[in-house]
Image: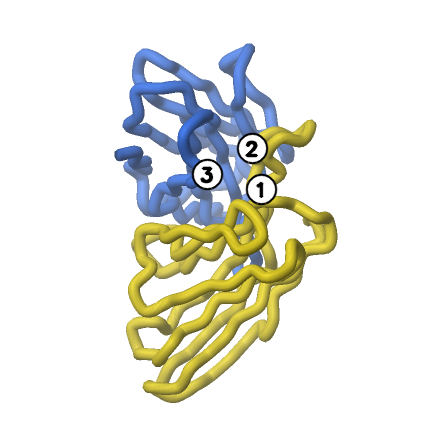
Amino acid sequence: AQSVSQHNHHVILSEAASLELGCNYSYGGTVNLFWYVQYPGQHLQLLLKYFSGDPLVKGIKGFEAEFIKSKFSFNLRKPSVQWSDTAEYFCAVKATSGTYKYIFGTGTRLKVLA
Amino acid sequence: DAGITQSPRHKVTETGTPVTLRCHQTENHRYMYWYRQDPGHGLRLIHYSYGVKDTDKGEVSDGYSVSRSKTEDFLLTLESATSSQTSVYFCAISLAGGPAGDTQYFGPGTRLTVL
């Protein structure tokens, strides 16, 4: 069965610090990968996604993620965080065939100190 | 936001009562999903639909049923609400097959409290 692990449950950073959030998945086949962000009191919004091609994908608000197939990882990065990046971040994976289901990680709460 | 609305947005109910949550989409997408979000658990899939009258169970389907009689509406029913079903419920749609590929978009959520 597919699963997604987000190892960092809570992260606290100061403004301008660099961010890297880990995401690992378990599935042997081809996958689509996603990062979503949820600001306090709001619904999930898509940050970025990987379907195929260049393993380094860029999303909104200066976020990027790198797909490393050999490590089953899809880590999220941002060179310099802002206070407004305070939110919860979710990694998700979907197999490209044989299922309609998306599997989500348990989320990482990021707090950015001004 | 793919035109997704959920109703009600907030509901307080008592243990043992039936509750129905509605998800409505305006853009005719085939795939619709119900998740619940709880601290420490992320999002867990309750049920999903891959077409009118075509539904299947997710990982936490016990105590929930769904119906989809029209493309635009996906209903989630708690047959007899329990306190463990206190949660935030999100509906999602998937743009599978379109230019955006298999991307999910989420509704605003329904906060349900079962007393």
Mark 2 surroundings: few (<14), some (14-19) or many (≥20) residues within 10 A: many
Q: Residue at x 38, y 46 (%)?
A: A107
Q: Are marks 3 and 1 in contact (CB under 8 Å)?
A: yes
Is A2 rendered above or below residue B37?
Answer: above
Question: How far apart in space, not on screen, are marks 2 and 1 (Cα)?
Answer: 6 Å
Q: Are marks 3 and 1 on the same chain?
A: no
Asked if residue A18 shows in the view, the reply is: no
Specify the amino acid type for callout 2: Asp
- Residue A1 is marked as none
Residue depth check, mark 3 versus mark 1: number of the one nearer the observer: 3
Q: x, y percentage for residue A93? A: 42, 33
Specify the amino acid type for callout 3: Tyr
In the image, which lettered chain appears yellow? B
Q: x, y percentage for residue B113? A: 42, 78
Chain of the residue that carries numbered disc 2 in the rendered image: B
Q: Mark 2 or mark 1: which comes first in sequence?
A: 1
Q: Are marks 2 and 3 on the same chain?
A: no
Name the residue beneath numbered marker 2.
B102
Q: Residue at x 43, y 86 (%)?
A: B13
- Residue B94 is marked as 1
Chain of the residue that carries numbered disc 3 in the rendered image: A
- For the residue labelled by badge 1, is the local secondary structure a helix, a strand or a loop? strand
In the image, which lettered chain appears blue? A
Question: Picture quarter containing residue B47?
Answer: bottom left
A12 left or right, relative to A113:
left
Is B1 rendered above or below residue A98?
Answer: below
Which residue is nearer to you in this view: B75 or B14? B75
Name the residue beneath numbered marker 3.
A100
Mark 1 surroundings: few (<14), some (14-19) or many (≥20) residues within 10 A: many
